[in-house]
Image: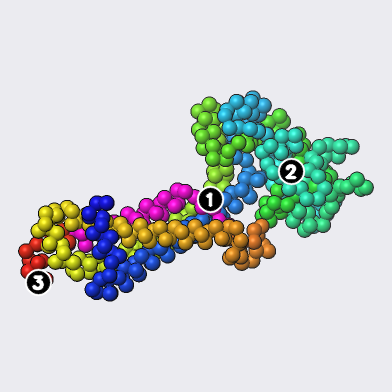
Amino acid sequence: MDYRFRIARRYLFSSKQVSMISIITGIATVGLAIGVAALIVVLSVMNGFFDFVRDMLVSVDPHVRIVSVDERGLDDPDALMATALDLRHVDEAAPYVEGRALLSVGGNDGDSRVVTVRGVDAATLGGVSQIVAQTGRGSFDVERRDGRSGLVMGMDLGQRLGVRPATDERPGDTIGLLSAQGIERMLTQPFSVPQVRPFELRGLYRLQGAYDESHLFIGLAEAQQLFRMGARVTGVELRLDDIDRSNRVQRELQAILDGDRFEVLTWYDLQRSLYDVMQLEKWGATLILFLIVIVAAFNIVGSLTMIVIEKQRDVGVLQAMGASRKDIRRIFLLEGGLIGGTGVGAGFVLGLTLAWLQDAYGLVPLAGAEAFLIDAYPIAVQASDLLLIGGGAFLLCLLAAVYPAARAAAVEPAQAVQVDG
């Protein structure tokens, strides 16, 4: 074992003449451990919420979406889907049509409201969205049967409107849709008759409140007729084998497709404002909690400075025996490293233990859990966060030891031995 390390360990952990030094060192170590543990737990909770929100939104949003820069839509979706499916990591592709429409129930204008209508191909939708699996009442049936086209809406919207989906015994309630183009024509041509298209309610899905109350689904062909798009579609949605490959697939598609005609968006781009706010909150909390580590670092400066004062004679003797100023400096830098390693290690043990207990047993419940889909704070530990926390805290401890180490190296051997003697 290197003699400098043995001396640093002896100075730090052996009994000292001034007990205040050991107290300050212990406070610094405990403060560092608490700061590291708090950072691990808080960042893990932030990551857990981010993953939960992302998974909830991606259950509806695709991993990658291709849309037309032109508002008229995409002319040849089949060729575009074939191009996308040739890429690695792309498992499924599905076209869609989306627009705004006025909804009415049974011809009653009092129940009218503006909603977002999505026309989908039921045969391919299940590959890119979990909406089919979330149909709680009725079935996800948007096909045209017995002269009536199917429609699926959110459970919350259906309950507000008081409508019921079709069953084997009876047909579903009739839902009327009037597109924005139809409303414009009605306003510009006062004597024209509004073309409200009737649909049969076939199912109710449940995902999240805001989405359920504003989005409904119909067949792709019906949506093309409703919004007068002909054979065009609004865009193509892709599902990948790994959501982390979204940026790579985006770059590959951007290299293949004409940027003047197509825009490629990832799941992050589709909800960028929300994800950016969550990331800002995460790093804001990190900076605030890192103040605990900074306070602990100041305690390390005080502790090591007092050790330098106490051990002046020892430092002088070491220099008289041949130790260089560089060796003296390294001894006290090693002391800062030992304090940092002990505090960071204890913080990791404490933080990871608390994170595991919360993840396994839900020790801290989520306030107002009845309004959420989870009962306790979610946990997601990321290796990159651990590396950042551990590396940052340890580096700060080493920086805190620079001044005491430089002061110890500046001690004159003759004066140190003479004064102490």
Say how the picture is coloured: rainbow
Give me the C-alpha separation between circle 3 and circle 1: 65 Å
Counting labels gives 3
Above or below, 310 relative to 119: below
Image mark for residue 24? none
Kindly identify the amino acid type of the residue bearing the numbered disc 3.
Gly
**Is residue 158 visible in the rendered structure shown here?**
yes
Q: Give the range drawn in magenta.
A: 378-407
Q: Name the residue under label 2.
A: 132
Residue mark closest to the camera, 1 vs 2: 2
Taking depth in this image into account, of 28 and 288 the one nearest to the observer is: 28
Q: Name the residue under label 1.
A: 275
In the picture provided, is 276 more to the left or to the right than 368? left
Taking depth in this image into account, of 371 and 359 the one nearest to the observer is: 359
| Position of residue 198 measured from the top left corner of the image (x, y, whole percent) | 83, 43
Say whether disc 1 or disc 2 marks the residue closer to the N-terminus.
2
Residue mark closest to the camera, 3 vs 1: 3
Give me the C-alpha separation between circle 3 and circle 2: 86 Å
Circle 2 packing at 10 Å, graded few (<14), some (14-19), many (20+), is: some
Kindly identify the amino acid type of the residue bearing the numbered disc 2.
Val
In the picture provided, is 381 more to the left or to the right than 32? right
Question: Does 233 appear in magenta?
Answer: no
Q: Name the residue under label 3.
A: 421
Q: Residue at x 66, y 57 (%)?
A: 373
Above or below, 124 relative to 310: above
| Position of residue 312 measured from the top left corner of the image (x, y, whole percent) | 15, 66
In the picture provided, is 419 more to the left or to the right than 272? left
| Position of residue 4 measured from the top left corner of the image (x, y, whole percent) | 22, 55
